[in-house]
Image (spheres, rainbow, N blue to C red):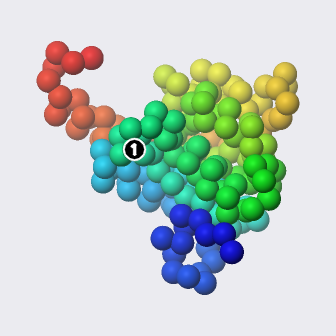
C-alpha cells in the first residue's frame, strides 16, 4: 500500500473527507503555517481525489535549498505516488493558499488536474488569472476549472505578516 505525507498528519486508518472548498482551505492554511517553522514562505497546498486528501505539503525551498520545492509541486508529486495510477491526476483538485506561479500552473496542466482552488491572488507572479491565465488558455492541451478567493483574507494576512517580519529583520540596504 502506498502511503502519502498525510500519514504523518492523520493517524493510521483515518480518512479525511473534505466536504467543501472552505474546509479544504483550512487544511491548506495549516500546511502554510507549518512552513514558518523553517522560515519558508507560508504557502500550503493539498490534493483531493474523490473528496479525500491524498497529499498535503507546504513550501520547502529554504528547508531543502530546492528552488522548485513549492507547495503545489510537492503535493502533486506525493498525490501521484499516493494514487498509484501514473502521473495523471484527472479527477484531482489542488487547493492552495496563494495563486500558483507559472512553474506550478505548468505542473497542474502537466498532471491534468481537474480543479484548482486558491485563496489569494499573486499580483506579482500569479499565472492563474492575475498576470497570466495558463489554467484556462484554450491554446494549451488542457484547461483547469479555477475557483479563486476561498479564505483569501486569512491567507493574505499570513503572507503579509511573514513578509512584514522579514523586512523588519533584514538590513534596509538589501533588495
Instruction: Determine which quarter of the picture holds residue 60.
Output: top left
Q: Residue 41: where, in percent of width, then height?
A: 38, 41
Quadrant holding the N terminus: bottom right
Say if 15 sits above or below 71 in the image.
Answer: below
Q: Is residue 129 left or right of residue 135?
A: left
Q: Residue at x 74, y 43 (%)?
A: 111
Whether residue 20 is visible here, answered yes or no, is no
Question: Closer to the camera, 102 or 97?
Answer: 102
Say if 36 sits above or below 5 in the image.
Answer: above
Q: Residue at x 38, y 50 (%)?
A: 35
Q: Residue at x 30, y 54 (%)?
A: 37
Q: Residue at x 16, y 34 (%)?
A: 169
Q: Is residue 67 left or right of residue 126?
A: left
Q: Is residue 67 left or right of residue 159?
A: right
Quadrant holding the C terminus: top left
Question: Closer to the camera, 31 or 20?
Answer: 31
Whether residue 135 is visible here, answered yes or no, is yes
Q: Which residue is mark 1?
A: 64
Q: Residue 148: where, in percent of width, then height?
A: 63, 41
Instruction: Determine which quarter of the picture holds residue 4.
Output: bottom right
Instruction: Determine which quarter of the picture holds residue 19.
Output: bottom right
Q: Is residue 106 left or right of residue 172?
A: right
Amino acid at each position: 500500500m502506498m502511503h502519502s505525507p498525510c500519514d504523518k498528519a492523520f493517524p493510521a486508518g483515518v480518512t479525511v473527507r473534505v466536504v467543501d472548498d472552505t474546509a479544504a482551505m483550512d487544511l491548506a492554511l495549516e500546511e502554510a503555517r507549518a512552513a514558518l517553522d523553517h522560515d519558508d514562505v507560508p504557502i500550503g497546498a493539498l490534493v483531493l481525489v474523490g473528496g479525500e486528501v491524498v497529499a498535503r505539503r507546504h513550501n520547502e525551498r529554504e528547508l531543502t535549498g530546492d528552488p522548485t520545492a513549492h507547495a503545489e509541486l510537492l503535493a502533486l508529486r506525493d498525490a501521484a505516488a499516493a494514487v498509484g495510477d501514473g502521473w495523471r491526476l484527472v479527477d484531482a483538485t489542488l487547493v492552495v493558499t496563494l495563486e500558483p506561479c507559472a512553474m506550478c500552473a505548468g505542473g497542474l496542466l502537466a498532471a491534468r488536474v481537474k480543479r484548482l482552488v486558491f485563496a489569494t491572488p499573486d499580483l506579482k507572479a500569479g499565472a492563474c488569472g492575475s498576470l497570466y491565465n495558463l489554467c484556462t488558455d484554450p491554446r494549451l492541451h488542457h484547461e483547469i476549472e479555477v475557483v479563486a478567493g476561498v479564505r483569501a483574507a486569512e491567507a493574505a494576512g499570513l503572507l503579509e505578516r511573514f513578509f512584514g517580519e522579514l523586512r523588519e529583520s533584514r538590513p534596509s540596504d538589501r533588495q
